[in-house]
Amino acid sequence: MNVTTEQLFTEARTQGGYLPAPVSDDTLRQLYELMKWGPTSANCTPARIVFVRTHEAKAKLVSCMDAGSNQRKVQEAPVTAILGMDMAFYEQLPRLFPHTDARAWFAGQPKKIEETALRNASLQGGYFIIAARALGLDCAPMGGFDAAALDAAFWAGTSVKSNFVCCLGHGDPARLHARNPRLSFDEACRLA
Amino acid sequence: MNVTTEQLFTEARTQGGYLPAPVSDDTLRQLYELMKWGPTSANCTPARIVFVRTHEAKAKLVSCMDAGSNQRKVQEAPVTAILGMDMAFYEQLPRLFPHTDARAWFAGQPKKIEETALRNASLQGGYFIIAARALGLDCAPMGGFDAAALDAAFWAGTSVKSNFVCCLGHGDPARLHARNPRLSFDEACRLA
């Protein structure tokens, strides 16, 4: 599928509001089928996703978001993804990374598990956002929520914890804010 | 710039070895100019990068990598990026996120700083890998190194800690391994 780096990076914007245009379940499946191929350490792929589309699930999610614009955005967006990380990801390694005993690198090491889950689920979060943009969707990733409430509402009975939330849909260009600046190459990078 | 989702996701592969074809400094600058636009929470952009290209810097980096294929890949690749995270990222927020006092959300809160740095520097790591592929580069991200030695060798006197390392260049198709499987949509995702 043809895309442009303008669409993925230089002209893509975090949205302040959404138009009512819907997003199909088929598009959400395509999104996963792209992002799943992004590399993670030992192919551990800890990201887990709930796509919130129904009225009921949306009401539950809104009640977990910080008051204000985060609640409004989730209310408006046709879909909001909850990106979680499976803290038992290493139980899948015998299948996902079969040529060595990678499960043994993690079992019983909570600090290593936590760091690996957060690093790799967030890497996958980057793939998710770019894949969504490749499919013509606008994104609004958000960290402003009550994590304990969100975990209880959407991941109860699982080993998954919430990482971040991302509205998906078609942004309302009238509600874009001015773009924030970025560090220059020389501020962020060094050639050695 | 035109790219394809095959090049970015479905046909891109983590490389097992590199051809000697060089990568220009100009390409490395273009890579940063793409990835820098990816969204982070409160525009905190904690990722910092050292691009290792010279013989001297490469020897220093090789000595920090785990013995075996990680050392060989760094030795072969024309460039290896060390992706770090600036634990003092919040000092930049008055400039990067100017419309509120976001610095105050972090100052004096080491656990929140650490989690925010790892989450967002890793999100940016995802943007980095996809941007590199958009520019026609192959990647081999790696976590197998002595973090304390790497921090001392490349980030001494700064507030930056190493996150992961990523070889960049043109992969040798003769040294690709079989592709590891991924979780299915139904294993990793839920519609709600």
Image (tube, coloured by chain):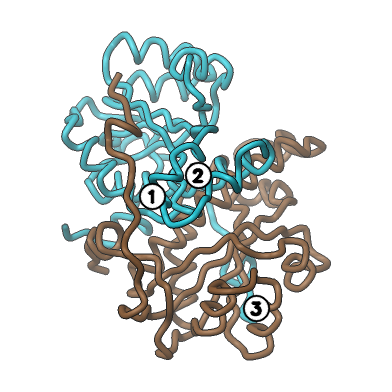
Chain colours: A brown, B cyan
Task: Measure the alpha-carbon separation of dots 3 and 2.
Answer: 26 Å
Q: Is residue B112 left or right of residue B64?
A: right
User: Which mark is in front, 3 or 1?
Assistant: 3
**Same subunit, tags 2 and 1:** yes
Q: Residue at x 69, y 39 (%)?
A: B111
Q: Which residue is mark 2?
A: B122
Q: Classify mark 2: residues with Cα within 10 Å, few (<14), some (14-19) or many (20+).
A: many
Few, some or many C-alpha atoms within 10 Å of disc 1 (few <14, some 14-19, many ≥20)? many
Q: Secondary structure at mark 2?
A: helix
Task: Tell me: A191 left or right of B166.
Answer: left
Residues at circles 3 and 2 in contact by the CB criterion of under 8 Å: no
B177 or A146, nearer to the observer: A146
The amino acid type of the residue labelled 2 equals Ser
The image quarter in which residue B22 lies: top left
Residue B66: quadrant of the picture: top right
Give the residue displayed 22% in from the left and 61% down from the top.
Answer: A6
Circle 3 or circle 2, nearest the eye: 3
Q: Chain of mark 1?
A: B
Q: Which residue is mark 3?
A: A62
What residue appears at the point 38 percent right and 50 percent down from the top-left corner? B127
Q: Chain of mark 2?
A: B
The chain to which mark 3 is attached is A
Mark 2 touching mark 1, by CB under 8 A? no
> Which label number is shown at residue A170?
none
User: Could you tell me the amino acid type at mark 1?
Assistant: Tyr
- The residues bearing labels 2 and 1 have C-alpha atoms spaced at a distance of 9 Å
Image quarter in which the N terminus of chain A is found: bottom left
> Dividing the image into 4 quarters, which one contains the C terminus of chain A?
top left
Which residue: 63% across, 73% down? A67
- Kind of residue at disc 3: Val
